Image (tube, helix red, strand yellow):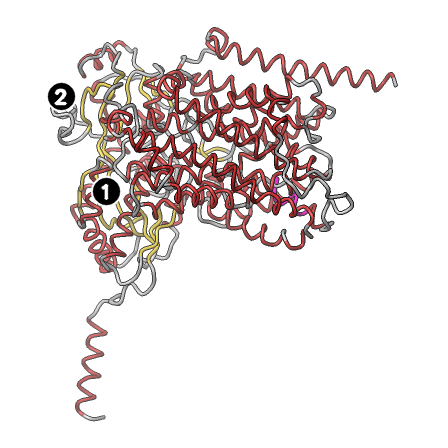
Amino acid sequence: MRPITRILTTAALLAAASAPAYADFPEKPVRLIVPFGAGGGTDSLARAVQAAIDKHDLLSQPLVVVNADGAAGTIGTRQALTAEPDGYTILQIHQEMFSVSAAGRVDYTPADFEPILQATSSCTFVAVPKESDMQTFDDLVARAKEGNLKQADAIASATHFPSAQLMEAIGARWTIVPTGGTSARFASLEGGFSDFALLSTPWVERGSEDLRALAIAGPDRFETLPDVPTLHELGYDVEACLLRRYWAPEGTPEDVVATLADAIEAALNTEEVQEQIDASGETLAILRGDELQQKIDEEYQSFVDIADVVRGTSQD
Amino acid sequence: MVEAFQHVFTNGLLWVLIGTASGIFIGSIPGLSGAMIISLALPMTYFMDGPDALLLLVSMYIGATTGGLISATLMRMPGTESAIMTTLDGYPMAARGEPGRALGLGILASFVGGTLAWIVLALLSPPLSKIAVRFGPYEIFAMTVVALSLIAAVSRGSLVSGLLSAAFGALVSLPGVDPVSGELRMTFGWHALDNGLTLLPVILGALVLSQLLEDSGDPTPITRDRTPSRAGGVSIRGRDLLAYAWSFVRSGLTGTWIGILPGVGGTTASIAAYSLEKAVSKHPERFGEGAEEGIIAAETANNAGTVGSLVPLITLGIPGSVITAVLLGAMVIHNLNPGPLLFAHNPEIAYTVIGGALASNVAMLVIMLLATPLLARLMYVNKAWLLPPIVVFCVIGAFSVSNRYFDVGVMVAFAAIGFLMNRARIPTGPFIIAYVLTPMAEESLRSGLVLYGGSFLPLLTRPAPALFLGIAAVSVGAALWGEVRSRRQGQLS
């Protein structure tokens, strides 16, 4: 063996030993599972991220969005759960993953996944019909204490848990009328079948002639509703924000998770994705690594802690 | 408004034609659904102008609803879910040598239904959507009961097997996530069942593949021996419009109203309209044997329901179905916020949707008229050419529901079940009707029970539910009375 070859071989061996085993990741397209149908908030963000990764070449292989809808997101989540932990199958879902688990409906928990990145946040607000006699959040608290309050919500959903936290904070219980997603809640309010609901930001504009906002269930006031206080300001430590996060199956190598997180974060910071996030009334809320893990642990624990109240307000 | 309409009928017309034609094409293929093509087209529309994107998607929606009647009429296989009721009378009429007439009636009915609903959409959207949201869970429940009462009527002559079939349909709809409590039920710890036995695989199996099994026993064209004299030309006759005027109006209004209700769609609309038409008919025994009114009711109501479902979408931002949910997503992506303010802030968008619905309705009529003479010949094609591709599309369709093979297995199982039911002379109609309507009936009833503190009383004290339940009782009573009388006559003779 000539010296130059020997040096090259040694160098190559050293490189192979020191470089991560997945240095070439990705070598084939990455599947991103959206466990909900086309056209919803989860799907829209996933498609925007996919288009941006494609356009700006943020990943050496394409990201492919796959809709696997059904059973409150558990069908698609299970497909990610049972996939090879090699980074080629990842998942995007919000706290619906926590609620099904905390309610005891599935046998997996967030600990069975590696969080990749938290992308956006979509906070809700407490809305009553315009003709309601509840003018302030204090009126709502009074009604709750009288035991005469109905909330439109989806049972054991990602908003039912914060609702239960609110019940606990106020020290009262009220009826949860099972309606479903935010548009069905709006219909229920409009029809006079329930007294209030947690609605997402697009309903600030859509409902501006029909609804009154009493409080913001997020960390900050809404720019579009500068006079409406947050629940924190009112003394209730409750937030109801959908946090859209990317996940990989447990055991996915750290550097693969980092590669994916870099690509998705870069995609989120492109102008096109920013525009779409604004259009959907959401805000960028990037979080990764240990910070993200800690936030997830705290949040999931808060869901588990309140699960009994959620069960108590679910009619069978 | 004028500008928006001008855009629709000039530059936008291309998108309307593309959308309508591709919608009809996809809708006519059993296995491929309107929801599927619209979901696939959605990411493409990100790069289009907002109004053009909406024109394309709305046209696809209208096209797909109509396209379903082609295979329903010619092959007894509903091309889309909303064409289920069309198989009942469309196919018998086509099979007796009048495919051109059967298709012609379906096309005419689709156009009339779409137009009637369009007039409502254009003139009455805001006030009607306000009334529609006052339709609460008990109102929806009672209305579903009216549609369910059709089971008794459809099973006339074999009430017991009809009811058995319906009970089986209701049972099949139960496994999966409990619609009210969110708990899993009847899944036996088998996670594949968590999503239940979903609509598309069950319908593809029980109605399409079972028919396909039946056909493959005898692949020769069914009408081979009949003279195809009237078959070649499409017969849309002006006098049908007059002769069945009341059927058109009743079914059109029923379909439009059901379409406007949030969460209720074209399939329920056509079941309800069919049940109404049969109830008021002077010769209900002809329904299911190729009755003109049967085709008219089913096809008028499903297109009216489709256009009607645009009303809550643009006036309240409430999507009533999978497809309108995708349309809502498209509007949000293009920063067009539907709702009460759409007419104030983006009137051009509201009028683009309204204009597009009209343009697509007209485009649908023209395309169908041009295509039908060719399509009607499918009746005379050896089915060995048609059946294999249909199997492929059905597998694609079932797989796409949740991106897994389990649903393909469900489809195959229901193909066997449907085939055996046909052989045992157990009608599949009650099975499908009960299967489609039970989840809505259950969810609205239980939701109402939570709302009214466990009391059933509002079902009788609220005017609309009381009226609907009365209609259902009369309809079931009439069917029972008819059954008893025909048995007695049978005994006498």
Based on the picture, tell me whether residue B210 belongs to the magenta stretch.
yes
Could you tell me which chain the residue with mark 2 belongs to? A
Dot 2 alpha-carbon crowd within 10 angstroms: few under 14, some 14 to 19, many 20 or more: few
Frontmost residue, B446 versus A110:
B446
Query: What residue sits right under mark 1 in the picture?
Result: A276
Quadrant for the C terminus of chain B in the image: top right
Q: Quadrant of residue B161?
A: top right
Frontmost residue, A170 versus B44:
B44
Distance CA(mark 2)–CA(mark 1): 32 Å
Dot 1 alpha-carbon crowd within 10 angstroms: few under 14, some 14 to 19, many 20 or more: many
In the image, residue B478 lies at what x, y percent?
68, 14
Which amino acid type corresponds to the residue marked 1 in the rendered image? Gln
In the image, residue B411 lies at what x, y percent?
57, 45
Frontmost residue, A51 versus B421:
A51
- Which secondary structure lies at badge 2? loop
Frontmost residue, B135 versus B137:
B135
* Magenta region, residue range: B205-213
Could you tell me which chain the residue with mark 1 belongs to? A
Query: What residue sits right under mark 2 in the picture?
Result: A234
User: For this view, does A208 lie left or right of residue B8?
Assistant: left
